[in-house]
Amino acid sequence: MASTEIEALTQALSRLPGLGPRSARRAVLHLIKKREAAMAPLLRALEAVNERLVTCQVCGNVDTVDPCGICTDMRRDPRALCVVEDVADLWALDKSRLFPGRFHVLGGRLSALEGIRPEDLTIDALVTRLEQGGVDEVVLAMNATLEGQTTAHYLAERLERFPIRLTQLAHGVPVGGELDYLDEGTLAQALRARRPVG
């Protein structure tokens, strides 16, 4: 029988995505067995991130610096902007190293059922970024869900007054699929086959 503290750690880990109670128990046992090599570095890393975690005021990414590393990377093309629903989508696209530009995180997607309206997302901040100029292309990288496509359609209408090339990911992304679960090959095909909106 595990102590209350060990059981609390197991329950905390089991609430993480992809970890059920059994996987969490195995992870806790590994941490206990490798206390110096695994638990201590994990604790230090968690504390460091917890103390320094911020949301980038430019794009909405989560990082330990503001503006984030992507926004300050001079190698990125500031004329190309990829709009995503969530930070997980940004990280998935950035990991693929296929998009050379910068990002904008909406913080969700429009959903009548969940009561998420345009003012609940960072759409106004996106419009402000475009009003500042310097952007030639906006890629709408919404998830291939009904809500994602509704959000893309709404954004297309809001952004049509700007002299930009407005594109969206090709439908190589499966319907109902979420970007952070896709392999790099699927992401690469979707980015290569992006097309104008409308």
Image: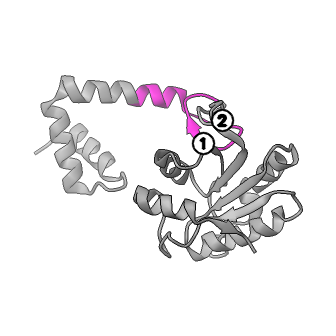
Taking depth in this image into account, of 189 and 144 the one nearest to the observer is: 189
Asked if the residue under mark 1 is in contact with the one under mark 2, i.e. CB atoms within 8 Å, the reply is yes
Residue 57 counted in the magenta span: yes
Does 97 appear above or below 65?
below
Give the residue type that dot 2 points to. Cys
Does 63 appear above or below 16?
above
Residue drawn at x 78%, y 51% as measured from the top left: 136
Location of the N terminus (image quadrant): top left
Label of residue 71 in the image: 2
Label of residue 100 in the image: none
Which residues lie in the magenta part? Answer: 46-66
Q: Which residue is mark 1?
A: 61
Location of the C terminus (image quadrant): bottom right
Residue drawn at x 86%, y 43% as measured from the top left: 132
- Viewer-nearest of discs 2 and 1: 2
Q: Provide residue 110's location: percent of width, then percent of height.
A: 67, 68
Q: How many numbered circles does the render carry?
A: 2
Residue 63 counted in the magenta span: yes
Residue at the extreme front? 192
Give the residue type that dot 1 points to. Asn
Q: Earlier in the sequence, mark 2 or mark 1?
A: 1
Name which quarter of the figure residue 195 lies in: bottom right
Residue at the extreme left? 1
- Residue 3 visible within the image: no
Q: Provide residue 83's location: percent of width, then percent of height.
A: 66, 55
Taking depth in this image into account, of 47 and 151 the one nearest to the observer is: 151
Q: Provide residue 36's location: percent of width, then percent of height.
A: 20, 22
* Alpha carbon distance from label 2 to label 1: 9 Å
Which element carries disc 1, helix, strand or loop?
A: loop
